[in-house]
Image (cartoon, rainbow, N blue to C red):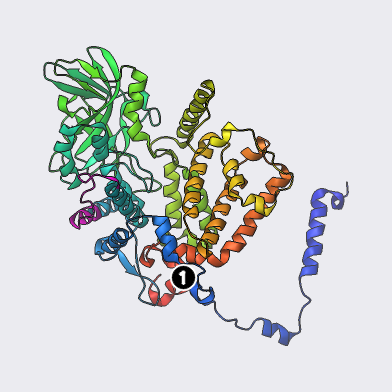
Amino acid sequence: MDPALSPAGRRTAAIARHLAGALPASPPLAAAAALLGPSPCLSYAPPESAEPAPAFSPVELRALLDGHHLTERDWVFRVMEESQLFCPRQRGSGSRVFVAPDYNDGKEAQREATMRRVAHLAQRGVFRGWLTEHGADAELCKLALLECLGVYDHSLAIKIGVHFFLCLFNFIMYSRGSAIKFLGTKRHHDKWFLATENYDIKGCFAMTELGHGSNVRGIETIATYDSKAREFIINTPCESAQKYWIGGAANHATHTIVFSQLHINGKNEGVHAFVAQIRDEDGNVLPNIHIADCGHKIGLNGVDNGRIWFQNIRVPRENLLNLVADVLPDGQYVSMIDDPDQRFAAFLSPLTLGRVNIAVNSVYISKECREACGGQGLKTENRVGIFKAEFDVQSTFEGDNNVLMQQVSKALYADFLAAQKKKQPFKGLGLEQLNGPSPVIPDKLTSSILRSSQFQSYQLAEDLARAFTERTILQIFLEDEMNVPSGSLKEVLGLLRSLYVMVSVDESASFLRYGYLSRDNVAGVRKEVSKLCSELRPHALAVASSFGIPDAFLSPLAFDWIAANALSTGSH
């Protein structure tokens, strides 16, 4: 067989012809010398120097995005920016200063730095009222400040979160402080709240086990009631029952909330929570408790994740968090809820709010950001890679995301079937479209149809758990957009909302799989994404500025990256 006729031979010949046509003929010597002459160096120009003036007020958009406590947010940013504990460093030829953790430090150094920052924030009063003040405004202020701390460092936010309420960025979960608040009663509030808020005691949240992350009902740690001593005996019966990934346990926590199977007179009453001390005032691990380090991680090394084994430790009867059920001194088990399944659901309900979050989107976005930044995206000081690793952690944080999504789908489907059985419309949850017949989707979707809120609302109500989260975000967006008066800001919000929906549809196979969109319409959606990006491009800088993040909390890559890498700056 003639090699030239083979597929490889044909490809080789085609490439050779292409190269021959692309390469210019050899120029004369003088012309060649001119081609090899020096070319001007790249220079940096601030984006605002080439961008038109914002078509809308970034201040107004920030007020809409943050929603509340803007003054308090700016204050806590200044608290961090002004302290040497937050590692301010000058980069570039000017006087620009950035604050960011030193990710080149080892694991132990990062942990100790995080704890020193927590102590400084406590001393400055950042946590004042986080547990002792009540009401919606106090809760919103707490979340606003925690979000700002997360902008500086996820480890810092999580370290504080596992102490107060196991909170990650904007998603509320609950831990030591808030487990006591929502699962305990007045006797616990009076005893623990102020000490927790002042960091006189340091808390962690021991629910996850080596063998049980998402399956809380199956945890194996046992708490047996001793009616003579009026104490609970907590024990780790096997290796798979060791408490695992417990944030704060490895180095600093003095107390923990232990989730255990409650045994009374040989009967298992199910999962309950107990307050247990694990270290003394000097930081020494108490007898019959063994704590080990989870080791170095792909991210969040400022958090001291640990493993805990309990060897028949005793805690007072009063340390049972007894909002749902209690144990009387004589060992009688009492609860207002007789059904064990309903009791378990009531017990977990305060802990599940916010446990479901779509970390996959964050990982995908950070990956695209890293690639768009080229080689500079690899540098730790620019933090893109750090974010990518830390967002990846979230996909199994406090339970595997796939399992949690299945739980949400199951609950939504059960509500839908219950409504059908009662022959009632399915109300709430943003999925009312399921009550009616599927609309007829035109063979060719125009730009105006794709950008209409009616079309977008229906298209994001198809795939249960994912649809629920995406549809909820869309509903909040539509409500805020509706309250904005006509003008340039409202127009930009419409573009942003449409881009969010189009990207959600474009990246989900469900619409094609279930036949809601034809192949031609799917192609039309992708084309609309590109069109929307082009229309939003002139507003990109103003939108980014609306996030309200001070320049010091960005990175050299966001500014003059050439000067930041110059020999004269000592960047080598």
User: Is 211 colored magenta in this rendering?
Assistant: no
Element assignment for label 1? helix
In the figure, is residue 517 to the left or right of 141?
Answer: right
* Rendering coords of residue 148 (x, y %): 34, 56
Q: How many marks?
A: 1
Residue, x 52% and y 24% (percent of image)? 417
Span shown in magenta: 117-136
The residue where tag 1 is placed is 561
Residue, x 41% and y 48% (percent of image)? 390
Residue type for callout 1? Trp
Q: Residue furthest top?
A: 266
* Rendering coords of residue 128 (x, y %): 20, 51
Q: Is residue 448 above or below residue 90?
A: above
* Rendering coords of residue 498 (x, y %): 58, 53
Residue 401 or 4: which is nearer the viewer?
A: 401
Q: Is residue 291 visible?
A: no
